[in-house]
């Protein structure tokens, strides 16, 4: 006996679009640090100032912006071993390059989108 499966392609497409939108506008939720980035974050528990040095295109800017976003929102990922701030904070984020500003803006848009959904 042949079994037929009915597939609702519209529902599948809607689900894929929702997943794509979530991934696009909630990038911080998908951030997985490299080993050196994890070590950098962990040092925040005992060191007030740290330096993350690495080659080109290795995630220094994204890691820094992610840490700022974690501290400003208080929403830390499960793997976070660095300093946790459990009270409201106000802070500045600045960078020499406009690229940092664009990245910080994307992460901040993510925070605002989350607030609208709450």
Image (tube, helix red, strand yellow):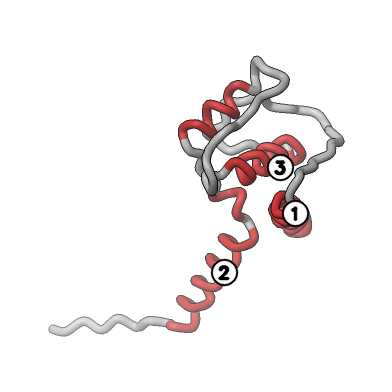
Q: As rendered, which of 94 and 29 lies closer to the eye? A: 94
Residue indicated by mark 3: 69
Q: CA distance from mark 2 to mark 3?
A: 23 Å
Q: Nearer the viewer, residue 64 or 4?
A: 64
- Is 53 placed above or below 62 here? above
Q: On screen, 56 above or below 49?
A: below
Crowd class of label 3 (few under 14; some 14 to 19; many from 20; radius 10 Å): some
- Dot in front, 1 or 3: 1
Q: Which residue corresponds to mark 1?
A: 98
Residue at 48% over, 38% down: 34
Seen at 67% across and 17% down, the residue is 47
Q: Position of residue 35 (x, y in %)?
A: 46, 32
- Check contact, mark 1 vs mark 3: CB within 8 A: no
Crowding at label 1, few (<14), some or many (≥20) Cα neighbours within 10 Å? few
Instruction: Please tell me which of labels 1 and 3 falls first in the chain.
Output: 3
Could you say whether the residue bearing mark 3 is in a helix, strand or loop?
helix
Which residue in the structure is indicated by mark 2? 18
Q: Position of residue 67 (x, y in %)?
A: 67, 37
Q: Is residue 118 visible?
A: no
Mark in front: 2 vs 3: 3
CB contact under 8 Å: marks 2 and 3: no
């Amino acid at each position: 006996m042949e079994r037929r499966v009915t597939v609702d392609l519209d529902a599948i497409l809607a689900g894929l679009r929702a997943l794509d939108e979530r991934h696009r506008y909630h990038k911080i939720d998908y951030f997985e640090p490299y080993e050196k980035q994890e070590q950098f974050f962990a040092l925040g528990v005992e060191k007030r100032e740290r330096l993350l040095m690495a080659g080109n295109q290795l995630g220094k800017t994204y890691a820094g912006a992610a840490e700022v976003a974690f501290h400003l929102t208080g929403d830390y990922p499960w793997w976070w071993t660095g300093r946790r701030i459990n009270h409201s904070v106000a802070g500045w984020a600045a960078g020499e390059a406009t690229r940092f500003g664009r990245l910080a803006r994307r992460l901040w848009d993510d925070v605002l989108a989350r607030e609208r959904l709450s």
